[in-house]
Amino acid sequence: MAGTPLPAPLTVATFAEQESIFKAAVGTAISVDEKAWDFRSRFECLRSRVLDRGHADWEGDDPRIARLVEHYESGLRAKGLIDFDDMALIGHRIITGNEWVCKALKARFPILVIDEYQDLGVALHEIVVALMASGVRVLAVGDPNQSIYGFTGAVPKLLTTLGGQSDVEVVRLNFNYRCGRSIVRTSRITIPSTFEEIPQVDHEGLVEWHHKPFGIDAQAEFICTELIPAIKARRPSTTLGDIAVLYPSKYDGDVIARAATKASIDFTRIDQNAAYRKTPLTRWLEQCAAWCSGGWNSGGLPLSSIIRTWLRFNPSASTQSHIRRLKRVLVRTLIDNRSSHQLLLLWLHELEDKFLRSTLEAEPTLREERAEFQRLKEAAKPRGELDRCTVARFGAHEGISNYLNLITLHSSKGREFDAVIVMGCDDGKLPSRGTPEEQEEKRRLFYVGLTRAKFEFHMTYSGGIETRNGGWWEKGPSPFLLEIQAQATQHQELADEEDCPF
């Protein structure tokens, strides 16, 4: 039905397998001397946005990228693999090419609810439109201003396109229940809204910027030694867990992590340079650790929730006796390993021996999780990044209040904090260089970071950035920051005359 040879059974390539095949495809389609990462964004966009490979847009301005996609997919198939983008692309071919499939889906799913619609690419959007044409009722929720995944093929205008259809009713949600009034006003400067967003909170909020002229390291030191203590002093109820430091890239994450360590600040970190990736399994293990290190006593983390997630990792368990055995072994192992001070590596080995190994080996859908579990164990070994990490500290990643949050701007989406600090607000870093479309996406990315804050939003900048060869590029502050400063100056002038606050 998809019109393409597929492996049977379907096996999803792990992240490492995808990277290896992509690197080989770059060497074949372009050159072994090129860096694979330099082509990743263009590869993702072409593959996900141009669905008709006979169209002139497929070759586009750079036919090498089309060849790269073809070599990559051939490399996957040669190993009997598909990847996550294949799921959408193959699904699109099946649904748009077989009307009876739409009718069958309508009979099974008469109503389709879609969250974060602005993150959809062309294939998924056209699947939605085809299902609507067959009579499926759709409820789609999204915000084009929060579309920040263009590098994976997301197209923000697709939500507007959907809303423009004659059979679609658009409901605008203009109440903001998170941000202080000054933060909402600042967000309108970054992305002017076509309709008024009305704050529904009773606090004004605080927006500040801080100039630290000696580079990103100076910004990080200031954040850890001065800014965070000042935030906590203003709001004594604010804990480290209520504060987030957001940054453009994983390399900035290295800088703030070093500064936090030097200042003796415990932190959790979410970026590609963290000790392990956040996956469904590693997040679940964090929950298990939080339960074992005190959650069992406080009741803040229900054991029933941990059990439900565990059963979802075991879809092959089809009999009641098998399900009861999975529950019994899990609960007994967690009870026997309730400890705050046990080393993470020993705790992981205990869970692996009792129940994890058998599930990871038996379930084909957990191939990626198997690799991530091994990465986590490596980090917990002697001289690893988590070599002295305890179960309590690992469980703190699930949201314990005394750990500072270090997160990339992309990973902050969907979260909220009392105070948000965006570091690296320098031109050339935020935004970095790119096409006009990429620059607009960086603006939306900054907007996402800004609107994570409930009470305080801070920006740090140096007025320049360090180059790869150790030089200094004096480009000035981020244009997003300059816009906010200019508007604040105007409001201050009005305030002096009319007592009108920013």
Image (cartoon, rainbow, N blue to C red):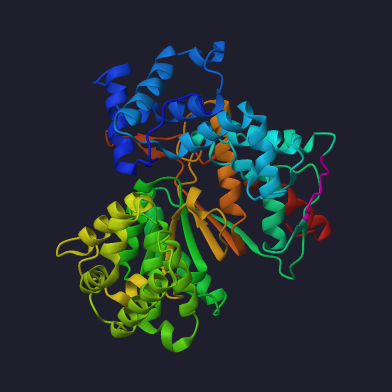
- Looking at the image, which residue is at 75% across and 44% down? 193
Looking at the image, is 22 positioned above or below residue 453? Answer: above
* Quadrant where the C terminus is found in the figure: bottom right
Q: Residue furthest bottom?
A: 297
Which quarter of the figure has residue 445? Answer: top right
Q: Is 194 a magenta residue?
A: no
- Looking at the image, which residue is at 38% across and 41% down? 9
Which quarter of the figure has residue 63? Answer: top left
Residue extent of the magenta highlight:
168-174
Residue 385: x and y in percent read: 23, 61
Q: Main secondary structure of the magenta part?
A: loop
- Is residue 471 in view? no
Q: In this figure, what is the number of numbered marks?
A: 0
325 sits left or right of 204 in the view: left
Looking at the image, is 447 positioned above or below residue 403? Answer: above
500 sits left or right of 442 in the view: right
Looking at the image, is 380 positioned above or below residue 307? Answer: above
Residue 408: x and y in percent read: 45, 51
- Is residue 111 in view? yes
472 sits left or right of 92 in the view: left
Q: Nearer the viewer, residue 301 or 379?
A: 301
Q: Residue furthest left?
A: 382
